[in-house]
Amino acid sequence: MFVCAGESEQFDFAKAIGIGMVDTAINLTKLCISRRPEFIFFVGSAGSYGEKKIFDIIESKTASNIENSFWNGGSYTPIDNIVSSIEDPSKEIIINSSNYITTDSKISKHYLSKNIHLENMEYYTIIKVAKSFGIPVAGAFIVTNYCNKNAHRDFLSNHKEAMARLSAYIKR
């Protein structure tokens, strides 16, 4: 089953499940209970922490949930903040999820040092829900912007072409 966030990120082959971590968790859980899929494949946009370029398409089976304040000692978490649907995620590109978009490019070096290259608001939740139901999961992401002060502007200007490219990639 293909899933996506929805609203501005809808695809004719994917079910929209909500934007952000909370709506995604609720709606994907409901979907898994009512129509348990054999496999979940998430498609969406992502911001790059700097090494991945605009319109790069990255597939991953690993996500993190790290808030920017973690890197300067402003927060901690008792949860396992990296999840994966594979046994050895050490060579995976990790996708970070938060309900906030990073606009401070100085933070990027911290993420990159942990092999976290992209951010997408939903993916951590997608993997957590899929794992709780024992459903295999993966995702494909297209870079729409860099995580810097121009993140939103660049997202908006690249979004339409990015969605067309990602859709063509998946359909191939």
Image (spheres, rainbow, N blue to C red):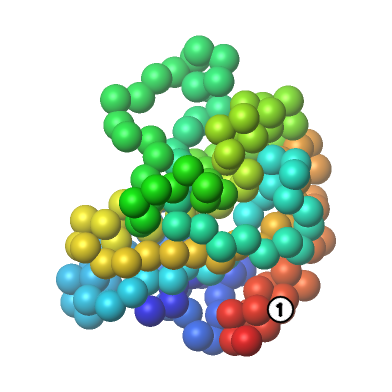
Residue under the image location 35 percent in, 56 percent down: 85
Q: Is residue 134 above or below residue 113?
A: below
User: Residue 91: image x %, image y %?
Assistant: 52, 47
Q: In this view, does 25 lie above or below 2?
A: above
Question: Viewed as shown, does residue 148 lie left or right of 38?
Answer: right
User: Residue 61: image x %, image y %?
Assistant: 45, 57
**Quadrant of residue 8 within the rendered picture:** bottom right
The one of 111 and 149 positioned closer to us in this rendering: 111
User: Residue 73: image x %, image y %?
Assistant: 50, 13
Q: Is residue 66 above or below residue 166?
A: above
Total marks shown come to 1
Question: Viewed as shown, does residue 128 lie left or right of 165?
Answer: left
Quarter of the picture containing the C terminus is bottom right
Three-letter code, disc 1? Ala
Residue under the image location 44 percent in, 64 percent down: 138
Residue under the image location 73 percent in, 69 percent down: 162
Q: Is the residue marked by circle 1 packed among few (<14), some (14-19), or many (20+) residues within 10 Å?
A: few
Quarter of the picture containing the N terminus is bottom left
User: Residue 157: image x %, image y %?
Assistant: 81, 61
Q: What element carries label 1?
A: helix
**Quadrant of residue 31 within the rendered picture:** bottom left
- Mark 1 sits on what residue? 164
The one of 83 and 86 positioned closer to us in this rendering: 86
